Image (cartoon, rainbow, N blue to C red):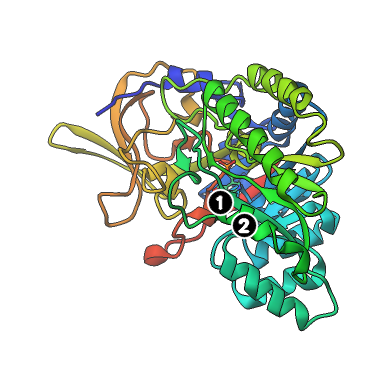
Amino acid sequence: MSSNSAPQHEQMSQFKTAQGQLVAAGLNMTEISQLLARPAFYVYERAIIDRQVANFRQHIPARIKLHYAVKANPYWPVVQHLKPLVDGFDVASQKEMLLALQSGMPVADISFAGPGKGDAELLSAIITGVTLNVESLGELQRVCQLGSQTSKTPQVALRVNPGFELKSSGMKMAGGAKPFGIDEELVLQTLANIADMPVKLRGFHIYCGSQNLKPESLIEAHQHTFALAAKLVAACPYRPEMINLGGGFGIPYFAGERRLNLAPVGESLQGLLAQYHNELANIELVIELGRYLVAEAGLYACQVVDKKQSRGTTYLVCNGGLHHHLANSGNFGQVIRKNYPVTIANRISQEATELVTIVGPLCTPLDILADRMTLPTADVGDWVVVYQSGAYGPTASPQDFLGHPNVAEILL
Ligand SMILES: Cc1ncc(COP(=O)(O)O)c(C=O)c1O
């Protein structure tokens, strides 16, 4: 089991400090809590979101559009903030689709992916003209049937489950048997009949995985993805308008992890664009990212309400925990629990001298904010802050579990 000290974590953070305290947009945690009149909250900083978008634009060729995967953080002010900064939104439910439409994003730049879409979801996408990333042949059939009940032609992209995978990903979503997408070989068969189906095939969605910090893995996946894209375009009875090349750009969560270096990824994409210039000419190419754009821009903050000793372990017991931040507890995709970067925000410039385990108020041993971490000596009333919390926060957490108050959010 690891014991992580604060300085490593501070190196990961893009947030600033002022007068010995961690601040977001110039406000310390006490001030943000007063502003919200709430004791536990997520705060997102616009400037960091902007920096992440700028980093993408700096390194990734301009020919490739940037879409935001709303699932990473659907907080309405964040969605609104990102609207003019990105070229499209990718949504995973009807609710997210409504957010995307209400933001004013042009409908042609909204796509809807995810297995198990219900008829009502499919219908609303068909009616509004949102592109449906079709996940199975059964779904394609239902789209055709539902479309025939409307005056609209369904706009679809076939999501392809390719033969290859994105190596070293936190979550692999392609290669082998998968609930996501239509197996590559079936897509190629389907293309033979697509011209006779009552849909407009806009293009293809090739999404392989997420949370990848290795440029070489992304580069290898891009090489396969471009080759597959060229094969699909050649097999398509008419020229598709767009190809979604996937995403998967990760962010560092754990001690020892380094920021993804986008420079080699961008250089490789530049080479692939040149290599496939003719095959992919006049086709819009998209990369869709969630956490890369927002995760580093978010802090989760809660307060210590009790400090206790138990047989040699010092516990800080907080008013927030797993119900607000499931991912930080290690129960959202981690195989072995590792500590997220955590600090005591109002003692950030003090030396880390005390070994503590930080827990939340839930009656379960899973409710851990930090397991055996060396931090500045903290007491009741101090602010425990989890960095890298801007993605998969409140909406990925069981907020109603045990009936404690829900968490507040603010974009500053
Ligand atoms: C289809 C699709 N797009 C985008 C994402 C966003 O991933 P991330 O937040 O890691 O960028 C996911 C994550 O599950 C996904 O399944």
Considering the image in quadrants, where does the C terminus appear?
top right
Q: Position of residue 350 (x, y in %)?
A: 44, 18
Q: On the picture, is 184 further left or further right than 353?
A: right
On screen, residue 256 above or below 312: above
Q: Is residue 280 visible?
A: yes
Mark 2–mark 1 CB contact (< 8 Å): yes
Please state which of residues 79 and 26 is positioned toward the viewer in this rendering. Answer: 79
Q: Residues within 10 Å of mark 1 (few under 14, many from 20)?
A: few
Q: On the picture, is 58 further left or further right than 70?
A: right
Q: Position of residue 93 (x, y in %)?
A: 63, 63
Q: Residues within 10 Å of mark 2 (few under 14, many from 20)?
A: few
On screen, residue 122 above or below 384: below
**Three-letter residue code for mark 1:** Glu
**Three-letter residue code for mark 2:** Gln
Q: Which residue does the numbered mark 1 point to in the structure image?
A: 185
In which image quadrant can residue 290 be found? top right
Q: In the displayed image of the protein, which residue is found farthest to the left?
A: 311
In which image quadrant can residue 278 be found? top right
Q: Secondary structure at mark 2?
A: helix
Q: Is residue 259 visible?
A: no
Q: On the picture, is 180 further left or further right than 323?
A: right
Q: In the displayed image of the protein, which residue is found farthest to the bottom?
A: 149
On screen, residue 384 above or below 377: below
Q: Which residue does the numbered mark 2 point to in the structure image?
A: 189
Considering the image in quadrants, where does the N terminus appear?
top left
Q: Secondary structure at mark 1?
A: helix
